[in-house]
Image: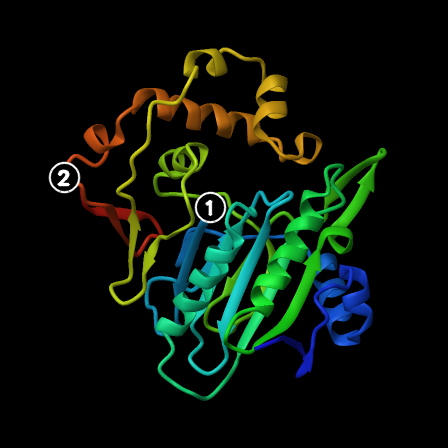
C-alpha cells in the first residue's frame, strides 16, 4: 500500500521541500519542530537507542515512557506509532540496510498492536545538506521502502536533509541532532540525552564491526537486552588508537565537520573496548546469552543476567 499524506498517495520521487509544499500541515510541523528549544531528557523512565538499534513499547509500559536517540548527522531517526494501540518504535537508521530495517520497524509495531482500530503514523527526522549527499540518498531511500510496505503508513513528520539544514561560517550542519518520543502521548520533541547507558561502548563497538540493526527492548517483560554479539578482532586497532583526533574524525565519520564535540572521544572509547574484547563471545557473552537489564526506580539500569 502507498505511503500517505492526509490520506493522499505520496509521490516519493519528489524532493523533500516539494513534499512539504504539497501539505501545509507537514510543513508547519517541520517548522515547529526545528524551532523548539532542545529538551534535556533525564534517565527516569528513559531508553536510549543507538545507531542501528530499534526499541518498541506501548503506553502500558511501567518502566519506559520516553524513547530517544541523538548524534544523527547523515543518519535519520525514525518513529513509527500505531494510534490505536499506542505501540511506538524508535530506530536510528544509517542506510546500511534500509529494506530490512524498515520491515523490522513495521513488524515491531504490529507485534504489539492487538487492535484493528487506528493507523500507522510515521515521523522521519535527520540529515542535512552534506557534501556527499548521503542524507539526501537516505531520505529518498526510506520514503521508497516505506512506500513498498504492505500496510498503509501515514507520514506525519518529515524534517530531513535540506529542511533540517543550517549554515554557520560556510559550513552546513543539522538543526536537529536528536529527538525523543513520549510513548504515552506520541509527542515528538527536539532533545539531547546525557544518559546513554547501559553498555554504551559495547553497543557502539558492535556497530563499528559492521553489526546489523537489532531490537534491544522486550516490552512484554520490560527488559533491555544487549547481544549476544560476536566479531573478529578489529584490524590495526593499535594504529587507530594512536591516531590524532582529526584523523579519527576524518576516517570514522560520514560528515566530519558536522559531528558533535564528543564524537572523537566516543570513537576512541569504542575502539578501546574492541581492543580489550577481541573475542566478545568469550569475554562478554561467555554463556551465549544477552546482557539483560531492568530499569530501577532511580532511573538507572540494573543488570539481571550475564
* Relative image position of residue 272 (x, y in whole percent): 39, 21
Q: Which mark is residue 210?
A: none
Q: Residue 159, located in which quarter of the rendered image?
A: bottom right
* Relative image position of residue 94 (x, y in whole percent): 56, 46
Q: Residue 65, located in which quarter of the rendered image?
A: bottom left
* Relative image position of residue 55 (x, y in whole percent): 41, 58
Q: In this view, does 46 lie above or below 254?
A: below
Q: What element carries label 2?
A: loop
Q: Is residue 55 left or right of residue 180?
A: left
Residue at the (52%, 81%) spot, across then down: 119
Q: What residue would you read off at disc 2?
A: 287
| Label 2, label 1: how far apart the Cα atoms are | 24 Å
The answer to whether one can see residue 49 in this image is: no
* Relative image position of residue 169 (x, y in whole percent): 85, 33
Lower position in the chain sequence, tag 2 or tag 1? 1
Q: Is mark 1 on a helix, strand or loop?
A: loop
Residue at the (47%, 11%) spot, across then down: 239
The way the protein has been coloured in the rendering is rainbow
Q: Quadrant of the C terminus?
A: top left
| Nearer to the camera, 88 or 36 | 88
Q: Is residue 11 above or below residue 290?
A: below
Mark 2: few/some/many CA within 10 Å (<14, 14-19, 20+): few
Mark 1: few/some/many CA within 10 Å (<14, 14-19, 20+): many
Q: In this view, does 74 lie to the left or right of 32?
A: left
Q: What residue would you read off at disc 1?
A: 50
Which is in the foreground here, disc 2 or disc 1?
A: 2
Residue at the (49%, 45%) spot, across then down: 51
| Nearer to the camera, 131 or 300 | 131
Amino acid at each position: 500500500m502507498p505511503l500517505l499524506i492526509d490520506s493522499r498517495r505520496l509521490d516519493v520521487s519528489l524532493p523533500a521541500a516539494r513534499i512539504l509544499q504539497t501539505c501545509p500541515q507537514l510543513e508547519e510541523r517541520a517548522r515547529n519542530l526545528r524551532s523548539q528549544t532542545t529538551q534535556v531528557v533525564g534517565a527516569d523512565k528513559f531508553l536510549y537507542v543507538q545507531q542501528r538499534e530499534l526499541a518498541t513499547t506501548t503506553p502500558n509500559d511501567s518502566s519506559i515512557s520516553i524513547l530517544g536517540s541523538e548524534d544523527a548527522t547523515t543518519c535519520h531517526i525514525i518513529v513509527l506509532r500505531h494510534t490505536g494501540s499506542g505501540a511506538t518504535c524508535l530506530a536510528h537508521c544509517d542506510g546500511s540496510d534500509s529494506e530490512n530495517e524498515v520491515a523490522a520497524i513495521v513488524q515491531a509495531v504490529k507485534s504489539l498492536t492487538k487492535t484493528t482500530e487506528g493507523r500507522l503514523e510515521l515521523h522521519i527526522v535527520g540529515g542535512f545538506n552534506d557534501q556527499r549527499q548521503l542524507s539526501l540518498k537516505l531520505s529518498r531511500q526510506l520514503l521508497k521502502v516505506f512506500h513498498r510496505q504492505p500496510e498503509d503508513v501515514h507520514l506525519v513528520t518529515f524534517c530531513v536533509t535540506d529542511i533540517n539544514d543550517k549554515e554557520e561560517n560556510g559550513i552546513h550542519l543539522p538543526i536537529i541532532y536528536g529527538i525523543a518520543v513520549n510513548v504515552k502521548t506520541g509527542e515528538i520533541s527536539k532533545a539531547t540525552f546525557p544518559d546513554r547507558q547501559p553498555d554504551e561502548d559495547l553497543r557502539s563497538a558492535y556497530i563499528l564491526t559492521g553489526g546489523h540493526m537489532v531490537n534491544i527492548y522486550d516490552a512484554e517483560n520490560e527488559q533491555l537486552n544487549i547481544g549476544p554479539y560476536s566479531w573478529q578482532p578489529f584490524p590495526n586497532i593499535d594504529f587507530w588508537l594512536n591516531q590524532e583526533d582529526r584523523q579519527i574524525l576524518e576516517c570514522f565519520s560520514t560528515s566530519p565537520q558536522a559531528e558533535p564535540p564528543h564524537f572523537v572521544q566516543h570513537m576512541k572509547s569504542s575502539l578501546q573496548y574492541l581492543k580489550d574484547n577481541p573475542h566478545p563471545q568469550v569475554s562478554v557473552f561467555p554463556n551465549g546469552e544477552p546482557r539483560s537489564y531492568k530499569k530501577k526506580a532511580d532511573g538507572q539500569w540494573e543488570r539481571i543476567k550475564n
